[in-house]
Amino acid sequence: MIKTEYYDENYNEVDPEDATLIVQILLDESGNIQKKIEWSQKKKTGYFTNISEINSDVNYRYLSQSMTCHHLEIASSIQRIIDHLWHYHAVSKDNSEKYKILATLNGSYEQLRHSLSHVSFEHERERKGGRI
């Protein structure tokens, strides 16, 4: 059996909606305590309430940065992935696994090339004063 008790921050028993601490007690058939778990409720202020608010925030953050910053982040992340893939390729003993890793590396290098060419294009455009 599980017994749930609700407390404030000073361990005074309160109604469930006013509780900041929740204590769950696991009892056996004789009423002896087997386990006691203490939970604290999370504060809900500052969190988005629905998916559209989350999407709007993500879109705003994404659109407010320059595309060059995004492509540099992508290039940096891909480089870390490539480093890990080469490590797994060196460790792997199975040839079919090595071929799969090489195929993934090929795609990763293509994406890296795309991101870096975009950064190069944007740099050249800025250097010429926004004209191509």
Image (tube, grey):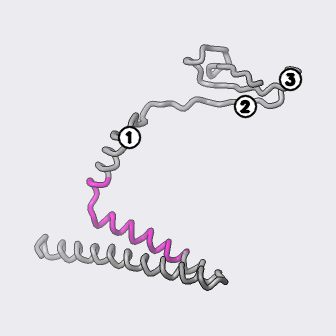
Q: On the rendered structure, is 95 left or right of 76?
A: right
At x 26% / y 54%, what residue is drawn? 63
Q: Crowding at label 3, few (<14), some or many (≥20) Cα neighbours within 10 Å?
A: few
The image position of residue 37, as x and y in percent, is 72, 31
Residue that badge 2 annotates: 37
Q: Nearer the viewer, mark 2 or mark 1?
A: 1
Say what amino acid the circle numbered 1 marks: Ile
Does residue 22 sit above or below 103 in this rendering? above
73 or 128, nearer to the observer: 73
Residue 19, by quadrant, is: top right
Q: Crowding at label 2, few (<14), some or many (≥20) Cα neighbours within 10 Å?
A: few
Q: Which of marks 1 and 3 is in front?
A: 3
Q: Total number of numbered labels?
A: 3
In the image, which disc is placed on residue 29?
A: 3
At x 49% / y 72%, what residue is drawn? 80
Q: Earlier in the sequence, mark 1 or mark 3?
A: 3
Q: Are marks 2 and 3 in contact (CB under 8 Å)?
A: no
Q: Earlier in the sequence, mark 2 or mark 3?
A: 3
* Separation of residues labelled 1 and 3 (CA atoms): 44 Å
Q: On the rendered structure, is 125 left or right of 57?
A: left
The image position of residue 54, as x and y in percent, is 37, 43
Residue that badge 1 annotates: 51
- What span is colored magenta in the figure? 62-84
Does residue 72 sit above or below 26 in this rendering? below
Identify the secondary structure beneath mark 2.
strand
The image position of residue 36, as x and y in percent, is 76, 29
Magenta stretch contains residue 63: yes
Identify the secondary structure beneath mark 3.
loop
Magenta: predominant secondary structure element?
helix
